[in-house]
Amino acid sequence: VYGAQRGHADDWQICLAHQLRDCKFAIEAGDAIFAPRMKALLLRAVVLARRHRTLADATRRAWRRRLDHDLDAVMALAPINRHGRRLRRRYGKVRDHLFTYLDHPEIAADNNGSERELRPIATYRKVTGSFRSNWCAEFFASVRSVVGTAARQGVDAYAAIKYALNGTPAHLPG
């Protein structure tokens, strides 16, 4: 979840892949207390995320309790390195959103899907040098949003754009 997307829903998932990257940085910057333990916990969560959709509800709830318990132990640590302290403060604020994927198996534990959706915009900007006007950038983003959402719902791009221009909702196939 990008920072701008936080707070728009009761439940959301923070990207575990990005958290691992930040823990690695803190370790390389000298934190030997908090970041290594947090990284180990996050690695367990990532391994579990690879199969969380296949687990029974009771199993996912048990893993959530276990990870939350282990997170309590990590949060009790008192890092002396500023990078470790920064991470600890962050996880104090977002801890309820680290393992949301276990409560809602339909969501992913990372934001790779969001980043894939943004890639065409970045590519277009790099190839053309940028958008020539704000309305052009907004139009491109709107079309990408409509087409991307439709694709995830099994609606082809042409039909989705036609529905959007007519002001009618796209219908799922079947």
Image (cartoon, grey):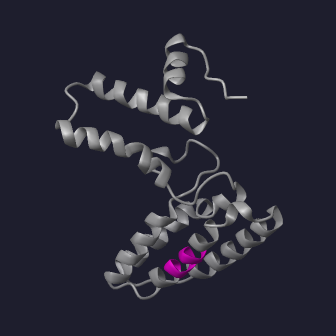
Residue at 51% x, 65% y is 16
In this view, which residue lies farthest toward the right? 58
Looking at the rendering, in which quadrant would you find the C terminus?
A: top right
Res 133 quadrant in image: top left
Q: Position of residue 172 (x, y in %)?
A: 67, 29
Residue at 55% x, 46% y is 7
Q: Nearer the viewer, residue 38 or 16?
A: 16
Res 152 quadrant in image: top right
Q: Is residue 173 left or right of residue 163?
A: right
Residue at 35% x, 28% y is 140
Q: Which residues are magenta?
A: 38-44
Q: Is residue 97 left or right of residue 145?
A: right
5 vs 143: above or below: below
Residue at 33% x, 39% y is 121
Res 30 quadrant in image: bottom left
Q: Position of residue 76 (x, y in %)?
A: 58, 81
89 vs 148: above or below: below
Q: Nearer the viewer, residue 149 or 97?
A: 149
Check if residue 41 falls in the magenta segment.
yes
